[in-house]
Image: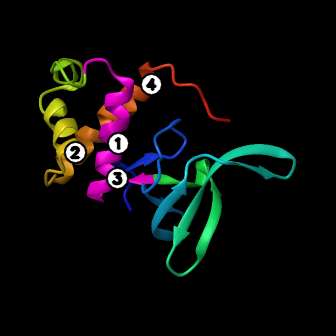
Amino acid sequence: MPADLTLPGTIPGLLRRGSPVLSPGITGEVVLSREPRGFIGEEPVAGALVAHPALGVQWLALDDLALDLSDPTGRAHAAWWISAHDDCYDSCHDFDDWLGEGHYEAAVGADEGSDMDPEDIARLRAVALAVAERTEVPDAR
C-alpha cells in the first residue's frame, strides 16, 4: 500500500474500534481496541488489539500500524479525527486557505462517505497530517 494512502497509527487517538489498518506484510486488519498498553522488553509501548481473518487477534505496536485510507471506513475515521481536533472543520474553508483548493471538500467528502479519487485521498491525508502537526494532542504512551 502506498504511504500516501495511509496515516501513521502513532497519531494519538486516530485509530478507533473498527479502523481498517495495515501492518508490514499484513493487510485488511481491523482495530478491536484502541491503544491498550503492551511491553517490548521492559518498555511500555502503546498499541492496539487487531483482528485478522487468518491470524486471529494480535496486539501490535502503534509504530507498526497505519490507518488504511483506501478504505471508506478509514477515510471516515480520519475525517472524524480531524473534526475532533480542528475548530474550523464544520464551519469554514480554512483548509483550502491553509493547504490549497479542494482540501475542505476532501475532508467533508470522507466524512460523508463519498467516493474519493487518489487526489482527494491525498488531500484528506494532508489535512490530517497538518492538523496533527499543529494540534497539541496528548500522546497515549
In the picture, the disc for residue 120 is none
Q: Which residue is drawn at 30% across and 59% down?
A: 71
Dot 1 alpha-carbon crowd within 10 angstroms: few under 14, some 14 to 19, many 20 or more:
many
Q: Residues within 10 Å of mark 4 (few under 14, many from 20)?
A: few
Tell me the distance, in whole angstroms, between the alpha carbons under discs 3 and 1.
Answer: 6 Å
Question: Which residue is under mark 4?
Answer: 133
In 3D space, how far apart are the residues under numbered discs 2 and 1 (Cα atoms)? 8 Å
- What label does residue 74 carry, if any? 3
Residue beneath disc 2: 110
Disc 1 on helix, strand or loop?
helix
The local secondary structure at tag 4 comes to: helix
Q: Does the magenta stretch include residue 30?
A: no
User: Where does the magenta region start and end?
Assistant: 67-88
Looking at the image, do the residues carrying marks 3 and 1 touch, with CB atoms under 8 Å apart?
Answer: yes
In the rendered view, tell whether residue 43 sits above or below residue 64: above
In the image, residue 72 above or below residue 42: below
As rendered, which of 29 and 119 lies closer to the eye?
A: 29
Tell me the CA gap for discs 2 and 3.
9 Å
